[in-house]
């Protein structure tokens, strides 16, 4: 149900949110992942870190920790295409580029662009579309570099407050920006955005900061205040606490997704667009929960 990846000897020496910053120390991330597929295979993590049509990766390089999530566009299933193949292949490719050191920490969009172009040049036929969000923590500069294409995203939480977040990208209601590979002759018909269209940012993090990266299955079902309530339960940076909190957040979002009487963020957004909608939004949910900690090797 759960998976946790962490690298090196990661040390956080005080209660979260109360740590002072020292420029000479390298930072790293302690990260746990949890997710649910909307087909009720609860918490089943398919090969390649994939929950339903969502995919993710957690990787490291000598100078950086890198996270990524992607959400395969489910509409391809109507044409006999497995939407998870595109998102999973994209995330696997990005992960490999990181492990091979073929990236610049300050340019996560470069990882996304290189990964996408590899898919375009792949000799094995691949069709589909996906949103994508990639975060890179530069250990020495303590800067979090991000790119987000579509409606997945991230939050940076410090002392119980959101201090930095991604911007959602939508063409129109429920139609996020996305990378695509269309069948030959259909390139002009299938919606496809350039990786360079991703929203990019850089932000200085501090020891004890909490970073939550997720697909829209979380954000469509849980508003910020609910997420922050769950994160308040995370009092220490030990692995078990991170795992338990990631599990709690993912499970609550999953339960709310199937509540027909709940006015979810998605339902509110639909109402704002003139649609009479109520209830949660059943969807795949992927959550990566990270804490910024001191790194020693």
Image (cartoon, rainbow, N blue to C red):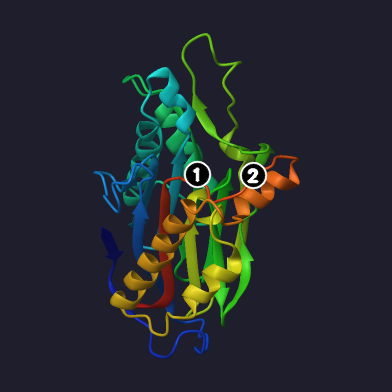
Element under disc 2? loop
- In the picture of the structure, the residue carrying the numbered disc 1 is 132
Of the 4 image quadrants, the one containing the N terminus is bottom left
Nearest the viewer among 151 and 23 is: 151
Left or right: residue 177 compared with residue 181: right
Q: Is residue 139 above or below residue 34?
A: below
Q: Nearer the viewer, residue 282 or 27?
A: 282
Q: CA distance from mark 1 to mark 2?
A: 26 Å
Q: Residue at x 53, y 64 (%)?
A: 144
Spot the residue most to the front: 261
Residue 119 rendering spot, x and y as whole percentages: 40, 29
Q: Residue at x 62, y 55 (%)?
A: 265
Circle 2 Cα neighbour tier, 10 Å, few/some/many (<14 / 14–19 / ≥20)? some
Q: Earlier in the sequence, mark 1 or mark 2?
A: 1
Q: Which mark is residue 194?
A: none
- Which residue is pictured at 52% across the width and 33% down the height? 179
| Residue 53 falls left or right of residue 186 | left
Residue 105 pos. (x, y %): 48, 56
Quadrant of the image containing the C terminus: bottom left
| Residue that numbered label 2 is attached to | 277
Q: Residues within 10 Å of mark 1 (few under 14, many from 20)?
A: many
- Seen in the picture, residue 148 relative to 170 is either above or below; the reply is below
Q: Is residue 176 visible?
A: no
- Image: 97 above or below 290: above
Residue occupying the point 34% across, 65% down = 32
């Amino acid at each position: 149900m759960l998976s946790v990846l962490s690298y090196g000897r990661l040390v956080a020496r005080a209660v979260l949110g109360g740590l002072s910053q020292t420029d000479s120390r390298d930072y790293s991330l302690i990260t746990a992942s949890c997710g649910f597929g909307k087909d009720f295979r609860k918490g089943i993590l398919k090969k390649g870190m994939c929950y339903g049509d969502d995919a993710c990766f957690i990787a490291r390089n000598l100078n950086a920790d890198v996270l990524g999530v992607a959400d395969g566009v489910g509409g391809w299933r109507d044409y006999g295409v497995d939407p998870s193949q595109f998102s999973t292949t994209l995330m696997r490719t990005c992960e490999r580029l990181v492990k091979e050191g073929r990236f610049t920490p300050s340019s996560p969009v470069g990882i996304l662009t290189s990964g996408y172009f590899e898919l375009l040049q792949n000799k094995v036929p691949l069709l589909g579309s996906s949103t994508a969000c990639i975060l890179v923590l530069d250990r020495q500069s303590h800067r979090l570099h991000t790119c987000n294409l579509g409606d997945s995203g991230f939050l940076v939480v410090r002392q119980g407050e959101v201090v930095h977040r991604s911007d959602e990208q939508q063409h129109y209601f429920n139609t996020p920006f996305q990378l695509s590979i269309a069948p030959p002759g259909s390139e002009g018909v299938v919606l496809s955005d350039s990786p360079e269209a991703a929203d990019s940012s850089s932000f200085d993090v501090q020891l004890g900061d909490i970073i939550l990266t997720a697909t829209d299955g979380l954000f469509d079902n849980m508003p910020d205040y609910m997420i922050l309530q769950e994160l308040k339960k995370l009092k220490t940076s030990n692995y078990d606490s991170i795992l338990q909190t990631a599990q709690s957040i993912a499970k609550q979002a999953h339960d709310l997704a199937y509540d027909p009487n709940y006015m979810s963020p998605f339902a509110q957004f639909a109402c704002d667009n003139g649609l009479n909608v109520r209830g949660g939004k059943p969807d795949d949910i992927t959550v990566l929960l990270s804490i910024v900690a001191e790194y020693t090797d």
